Image (spheres, rainbow, N blue to C red):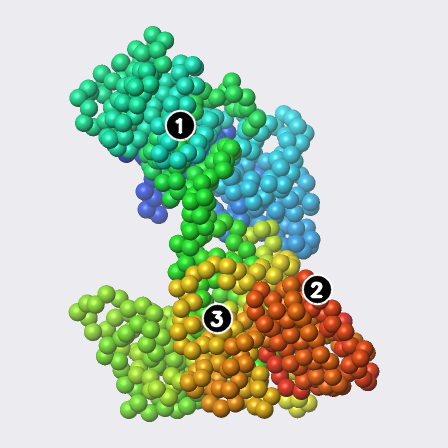
Amino acid sequence: FQSFQNVGEEKNFVFLSKKIEPSSLLETAPLFDGLKKELAWNKFSGPTFTESYCWPPVAQGYDVVVISHQGDDPLLYIPPVLTLLQLESDCQASPNISGVSLILCPGWKKAQRVFDLLKTYGKGCRHLHPMLIILGQNEEAASQVEIRGCEVVVTTPHNLLRLLEHNTWLLCRLCHLVLDELEVLFSDATEQMFTILDCCKKATAQARGNPPCQIIAVGTQWNKHITPLIKELMNDPYIVITVIEEAAIFGNVQQVVQPCMNSSRTAELLKILDFTQRNLEKVLVCTDSVTEVEMIHKALKSNSIASLKKHKESKCNAKCVLERWRKMHNSGIPAVLVLADDCLQPLGITDATCVIHFSFPSPGVFGQRLQCMTDNFCTVIKDSAVGQEHTKAKSVILLTENSSCHASRILNRLKHAEAEIPELHDSTARVLESEENEKFSRPLCASLKTFGICRNRTVCPDRHQINLSIDMAQNIADEMIETPERVTILPLLIVHATNYFGRIVKKLKDQYTVLAKEMNDYFKVPGHRISVNTVESSVFYGLREGAICHRVQVVETPAKDEENVYKVTITYIDEGRTSQVNSDQLLHLPAKFQSLPPQAVEIIVCRVKPIDNEAEWNPKVTDRINRKIKGKLHHAKVVHTLGRTVWVDPMVGVTNLPTIKIWINEYNIRSEILSTGLGTDNPEHIAEIQKLCRQVPVLGHAENLEHFTKEDTAGLEEVSNPQDTSIQENSAESCNTSATPPIKKMFLDVFFLDDVVQTKEAEDSTVHQQKSCHPQIKWFQDNGTVTLKVQILRAADSKCEFSKETVVFSAYSEGKLYVADLELYQSIIAEKSTCVIKDTEVVILLVKEEKGAWCKLLKNKNVHVSLDFEHWEESEDERPFIVG
């Protein structure tokens, strides 16, 4: 049996493999009375259209597959499953030997939601003891899990496999198996799902005589793995699909995309019709305008193709057109109907064999056009490699250069339907890239920053490329990162296990500590607490919380109303947290307290991510890290920065012993996360972040570079005046000749904001600065040599001059001149030192005049030169920091 129904005024669509009497009212729904009361108490507004069709077969114990836009909602199955469990509990003589219900969710977050709903709505269900099982990779955890009595176990595929290692009997007691968001389960945990289903098959074979396990699979999309699931494990399931596009995939509608130029659409249409004419198909040619309907009809007539037309201005009514179209087909004449989209619903056609999309359809219209072929959807449960004999319906899309705005949606639709993807027009391919550019004003993707990857960029609303005007709007002052090899960090806001906001604290005289004391003293005086009359966005204000004063910035104000006091959203610019306060709490902040730049920075711990391909950290890990690190000093090595975000690796908790003047490393945050069993190694993280930043020149967003070139900026170069060591220590890649703060520029490894340049020597050095750039250099040593790795691609015209205490290297790369003039801390043997040019770097080997360890490389600090931590002899996670 199959049923395609348009139900009610909303014209809801449903495909049913077997007849179901829907239950659209809660009062008549097949649920036990206690559950109905609980649903009503929680203001449940359903059942929804999909629930009205899927609840009855689930509550009766049948296997069910549900595909719906609502397919990620656990209430599709929880109420009828609870009803079944209540019924089984009433009939069970001994609840201690009852079966186990297993709900598989795609991740810990969804599992937690399902568990919470079970606790909410299972209060009236006797002997129900739901269990949420989220295990780490520690083996003891799985061995200690005890499953008691009549249980509903909620878990994920990875965690179930860990559980089965110590509870092999679990699947033998399985009476209900629910696959929640099955398309995500099969896409994100494919191997694990195959293993689980194979175990279920074996358990079913061994448990002969026991009632068969009920299987319920719900999701938002049809998936190719559903077919073997139905064939091998399910017993003649009810299939409920309320999304026409998904029903078309299940119905094996052949989806074809035919690229062509907009000017040649008619010629392409005639070619397609030539084939369909030979096969006596019932063809609909759909378009979105009256003009095109008339044009197509005229073209078909001039090419001796019998056709009918229908649009809103046609004189012939819908019933007349349908009768003539069907008579043509029954008499053996190829039937072609040219149709405007606004006539699709009035005609109500369901028996077409081919729909040709002459104009590209909008999302809603695409479904309406496919619905015209529902009588010819294949209803045989088929293998993915199905032959053409099972294909009765065809959808042909004419893709032109004018359709490019829909290109990404077409590609996603085709991939999902496993259709052949054609070679697209250049303009269409460019639009795929421009889709990302449309997100250019959005924040940089949090997952990309935190883990180096975003698993679903097409759905993610945020940006996945650098926007200089946003990411570089506020840079970290160079005095905050005096030595990238070791900075002192004070985390104050814990977003999750590896992402925090806090301050970088200076070792000696911390400017913010001084400022905070001065602010507290200032606002202790009642006369200094001047409330603000008019609150403005982006302006700095003072805020007293008890005895502590904060600098805050207003980020959002409500629409103006008659009230004098209203809520405003603020951010604490020296901590990073956001809050809402009353407008009358904001105080005027004197200019002397605004001169210090905002101190809050975003901190990301590198090289660790959640296990099991999870997108977010389990709250257990975040809570543990929060308790351990918040408000405590840490030492960290800065491996990369972008604007006010710093990536650190490692980051260790430290304790200061002032009496003996040493710091003791207490713990390594990355190691702490790994020890929970809920984190795993992420070796590609840093490389992915560096790759992201290297793509900046390629993006070509010139408008975002304007402010780097309009204020006498010198380019990406270094100030290197040996006569002024203070300038040399604070050198960056730009300098301003007008004695104003230089513009902020981007390094690929570390970002700095130059100090005010007031010396004549610095002005003179600008001329040299405009001609050359300083390369990034990493160094390491052994007892007899020092190795420098100069980070420069495809060096050309390179020169390397050695003397007893200096090394001068120069080379061209990608049209830029790079120069490094290094004054060494100790002497070398110039004649034995060498320079080797490689494709991605230059390796300089310095032979020490006297063997032994150097405490540092250069006499004066150079921000472009840093230790190569990859060549430490001891592990970074264990060895204390060395400043060199």
- Nearest to the observer: residue 785 or residue 819: 819
Q: For mark 3, what is the residue? A: 643
Q: Quadrant of residue 874?
A: bottom right
Helix, strand or loop under label 1: helix
Helix, strand or loop under label 2: loop
Q: For mark 2, what is the residue? A: 838
Which of the two labelled residues, at mark 1 and mark 3, occupies the earlier sequence position?
1
- Give the amino acid type for the residue marked by disc 1 in the picture: Glu
Q: Quadrant of residue 442?
A: bottom left
Residue 245: x %, y % from top left:
41, 33
What is the quadrant of the N terminus in the image?
Answer: top left
Residue 105: x %, y % from top left:
53, 44
The answer to whether residue 393 of the structure is visible from this angle is yes
- Give the amino acid type for the residue marked by disc 2 in the picture: Lys
Which of the two labelled residues, at mark 1 and mark 2, occupies the earlier sequence position?
1
Q: For mark 1, what is the residue? A: 268
**C-alpha separation, residue under disc 3 versus residue under disc 2:** 31 Å
- Nearest to the observer: residue 769 or residue 663: 769
- Give the amino acid type for the residue marked by disc 3 in the picture: Gly
Above/below status of 782 relative to 334: below
Residue located 53% across and 51% down the image: 455
**C-alpha separation, residue under disc 1 versus residue under disc 3:** 52 Å
